[in-house]
Amino acid sequence: MAATAALWKRAYLGLGANLPTYQSPDQTIAAACSLLDRTASIRIAAASSVYRSKPWGKFDQPDFYNAVVKIETVLSPVELLQVAKGIERELGRTPTYRWGPRVIDIDVLLYNRTNWNQENLIIPHQHLLERPFVFVPLLEIAPDVMMPDGRLIMHLVPHQPPEFFGLAKVGELQWEKLP
């Protein structure tokens, strides 16, 4: 799908995984990024480091690996969500329970400074400012990113090193090297 530059919108996606499959959770995140970037209507513009964190919401499960990618897309928010959910299924995600363990999770965090509130999609993501495993990698790649109302996210979250929040930087997200 060819599109002029004016049609491309900026969005940020959060990726998380804590269950191994034939690969480790951080490798599953890299595979998801590779599949996202191979989608004709999506291109990855930047990727954060991968961070390991304790589970959020439901604690008796393995640690999570998390990253954020900045993308450009011609898809609507709902179409982007559909692509993300399709990639989750392709990588082996099956429904469990709220905040439960998962092979991969891809959340739409922000979309072109748009507010979106439908039954299956809320943008900005409703827990964006509460979850260090989301806002730390987001600010790593986009320190000047704003909420739809123009407020800088860096002014809305605590200014602490990742370790303060219990995050451990695992390393770079190596998605570009995948076949």
Image: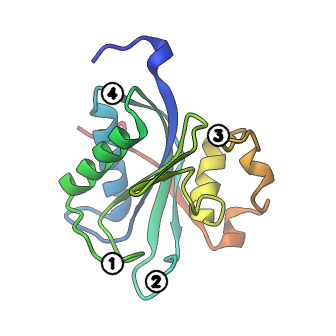
Between the residue at mark 1 and the residue at mark 4, the CA separation in whole angstroms equals 30 Å
Residue at x 26% of width, y 49% of height: 87
| Left or right: where 163 falls relative to 61 | right
Name the residue beneath numbered marker 3. Answer: 142
**Tags 1 and 4 touching, CB below 8 Å:** no
Q: CA distance from mark 4 to mark 3?
A: 21 Å
Q: Crowdedness of circle 4 by 10 Å Cα count: few (<14), some, many (20+)?
A: some
Q: Earlier in the sequence, mark 1 or mark 4?
A: 4
| Image disc number at residue 58 | 2
Earlier sequence position, callout 2 versus callout 4: 4
Q: Which mark is residue 151?
A: none
Location of residue 40 with respect to 125 vertically, above or below? above
Residue highlighted by disc 4: 41
The disc, 2 or 1, on the residue closer to the chain's N-terminal end is 2
Residue 151: x and y in percent read 76, 44
The kind of residue on which mark 2 rests is Lys
Which SS class for mark 4?
loop
* Residue pictured at 25% horizontal, 70% vertical: 95
Q: To which quarter of the image does residue 29 belong?
A: bottom left
Q: Residue at x 40, y 45 (%)?
A: 174
Kindly report which numbered mark, 3 or 2, lies closer to the viewer in this rendering. Answer: 2
In this rendering, which labeled residue sits more in front, label 1 or label 3?
A: 1
Quarter of the image with the C terminus in it: top left
The amino acid type, in three-letter code, at marker 1 is Tyr
Tell me what residue is drawn at x 64 percent, y 56 percent.
136
Kindly report the distance in space between the C-alpha atoms of the residues bearing marks 2 and 4: 34 Å
**Mark 1, residue position:** 97
Label 2, label 1: how far apart the Cα atoms are: 10 Å
Relative to 27, say whether 17 is above or below.
below
First-in-chain label (1 vs 3): 1
